[in-house]
Image: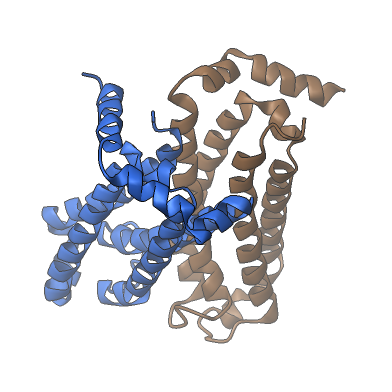
Amino acid sequence: MFLGQLWESLQASSLGVFVAESAWAFPTIESLHVIAIVTVVGTVAVMDLRLLGLTSRDYAVTVMSRDTLTWTWVSFVLAAITGLLLFTSKATSYMANPYFLAKMAMLILAGLNMAVFHLITWRTVKEWDTSPVMPTGAKIAGALSLFFWVLVIFFGRSIGFTLGIYE
Amino acid sequence: MSFSDQLFAFTEWLRTTSLVETSLSISDHPLSLWIASHFWAIPIMQTLHILALCAAFGSVLMINLHILGLTGKSRTLTQTVKRFQPWIWSALVVLIITGIGMIIGEPIRELINPIFWIKMGLVILLILLSLWYHSALTRNMVQWDMTLRARGGVRLGAIGLILLWCVIMFAGRWIAYAPV
């Protein structure tokens, strides 16, 4: 299968071999990955709790979005780069691990949820921007986002305990 | 002596202390045995630990990036601190409880581990620095709201606290890789 070959050549690449064999590379990249994800989820949660109408109700939703979104994206890029580097070390093992696949699925769902929210619910934001009561669409987006990101972290941590046992 | 040599020496020393007996007696405790026999106990505690970190570090960023003028410009510092400060301390409680849970579950991995003790030292330093920084901030917050960014020491404190949190998270992950 073409993709299978891709994963194999990825982990056989000099980068993949380096991350896998270096004494410090994997733990260091993994530590940066944790810091990045903690920042992503920490800032996302601030926005989600506002969308749920649970906190910062005196804070306009558009302002809250502006205050958090830059940091969410910056840290997401760092998480994606470090995640990709970790992946290269054992690409075939990750692809065989159900928790890794579940984590990727949750990431996609979190992204879709965000896209739907910004393309549909966000269009009427002027009507509820400063309201303490959020429309149902915003509440659902906030709740789903928290749910998916909590699972991203749970599945992510589970990978470390299960990698290699599904091959 | 390289850093990893020093870590080895630290481990050797930890092995001569009564922490070994303490760890062994913790690992005989029913709670420890229960955790050891339940595969998901440690991953779930680690997940909760990281989620509490998200709440704490997210809040730390919102406060300190505000001080640096990088976010929250439409709010006063007083409002930002009031919104996010309580989350840091609540999250700290969860971090301590889940942290203790992980020690009970794997006492030797934690207590006979040089990086664990470095992390604990840094955590205590972080708590003391945060309390000190926060009290200086609250005493002067109203006046500082206007001139905050002009104050070098205040900026340095904000950057220092963010970095210290990062170093602690870094050390936390390295506990798993300590040369023991």
> What tint does the image give chain A?
brown
Answer with left or right where residue A74 lies relative to residue B62. right
Taking A124 as reference, is A114 above or below it?
above
Answer with left or right where residue A89 lies relative to residue B117. right
Here the colouring is by chain
- The x and y percentages for residue B160 are 23, 49
Give whichever of A163, A127 is nearer the camera.
Answer: A163
Taking A154 as reference, is A128 above or below it?
below
- The x and y percentages for residue B111 are 35, 45
**Residue beneath the point at 32% across and 58% down:** B65
Total numbered badges shown on the rendered structure: 0
Q: Residue A100, located in which quarter of the rendered image? A: top right
**Residue beneath the point at 27% across and 22% down:** B5
Instruction: Specify whether residue B167 is in view.
Output: no
Give whichever of A104, B2 is nearer the camera.
Answer: B2
Q: Quadrant of the C terminus of chain B?
A: top left
Give whichever of B73, B176 is nearer the camera.
Answer: B176
Q: Residue B18, located in which quarter of the rendered image? A: top left
Taking B72 as reference, is A166 above or below it?
above
Instruction: Specify whether residue B85 is in view.
Output: yes
**Residue beneath the point at 17% across and 63% down:** B133
Give whichever of A164, B89 is nearer the camera.
Answer: A164
Q: In which quarter of the image is the N terminus of chain B?
A: top left
What is the residue that sits farthest to the right in this orientation?
A: A1
The chain assigned the colour blue in the figure is B
Answer with left or right where residue A145 lies relative to residue A53. right
- The x and y percentages for residue A94 are 69, 33
- The x and y percentages for residue B177 are 44, 33
**Residue beneath the point at 26% across and 56% down:** B68
